[in-house]
Image (cartoon, grey):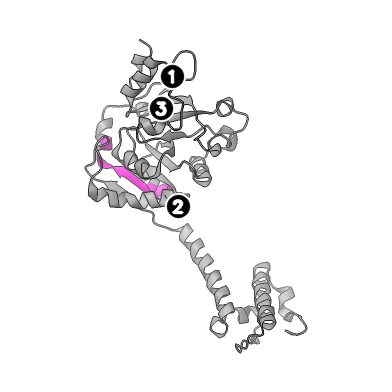
Amino acid sequence: WLKSGSMAPSMGRAAPSRRREMGSALGIAWMLRACGLRCGWRPSNGGMLAAALVPQRCPAQGALVHLRRSRTALRAQRGSRDIPYIDLEEVAMAEPIWTNHESKLDTVVAALSGDGMGVIPTDTQHAYVARIGSKRGSRRIYDVKGIRPEDRKPLSILCSDVSMAAQYCDLGSLPRSWFQSLKRCLPGPYTFILRATSNVPRLVFEDNPGKRLWERREVGIRVPACGTVKYITDQLGPLLASSACSEPSEMWESQRNKLDFIVTATDISVDWEGIDGDQKLSTIVDLTAVEPILIRQGLGDASMFFD
């Protein structure tokens, strides 16, 4: 049947998945014939599928089976995987992280260097984060929050300091008094809406066409007073972020199959004692208009912009 190119009689009646496996085996049979290999491979009486599952007789056939097994293992791993849950014990938000914690966060840095997405602490709520240049990472943030494409809003940009923020937003055009007030607020629990520079990747603006905010190329800049954010952004550059309203333990139970890591700082809850849930957010100030506009009152005091 190799010379004639005919198939085993059972192939026409096989299920689609089995026919695909049979077709792969047939392709390998013809490859062996074309290359003139003398490896002793022969189809068994069980048909093409049985022959495809005998890797020890042929190197090429073994590679096919190895690939099939690898894909099966990957699907199983995605279904029930354990992701890193990093608890930075006794780390206050605004303090630099300790040396022994840096090795733990290197796992996070490695994940974010690709298209990874996970949860880290900030100086307000925890946040879903991805590398600023990762299109897949940014869309994973929208997906894990269940936001439909037509309802998506721009993701905030987390920076390590004002100097890094100045590369992605136009601080030079701000009135001097606004800029001085901004510098007094940062690092801190604020999000400032500013005009974007050309350094902001196009993907930040193209997920929600037709929205005025996206068309005007404005970005929300954050410089949290958080050692974890500073360490990661010093290593990778800015991160795209969106608030994660659930507790880390709850996200571990319900979302860990959708995340690549969860980082939490133990002392973050101490700073929230006596604060209502709707106040555990950053204060948002829009600095793109003629006058500053308070979009949302959160943990930060923005009165200096309106005195």
Q: Residues within 10 Å of mark 1 (few under 14, many from 20)?
A: some
The residue depicted at 36 percent of the width and 22 percent of the height is 182
Sequence-wise, the earlier of marks 1 and 2 is 1
Helix, strand or loop at mark 1: loop
Q: Quadrant of the C terminus?
A: top left
Sequence-wise, the earlier of marks 3 and 1 is 1
- How much space separates mark 1 and mark 2, taking CA atoms? 43 Å
Q: Label 2, on which residue?
A: 257
Which mark identifies residue 92?
Answer: none
Q: Label 3, on which residue?
A: 191
Q: Amino acid at mark 2?
A: Asn
> Residue 124 placed where, x, y %?
34, 32
Depth check: give the residue in front, 12 or 152: 152
Q: Label 1, on which residue?
A: 174
Q: Amino acid at mark 1?
A: Leu
Q: Quadrant of the N terminus?
A: bottom right
**Is 29 covered by the magenta stretch?**
no
> Residue 155 placed where, x, y %?
48, 34
Helix, strand or loop at mark 3: strand
The residue depicted at 64 percent of the width and 72 percent of the height is 21
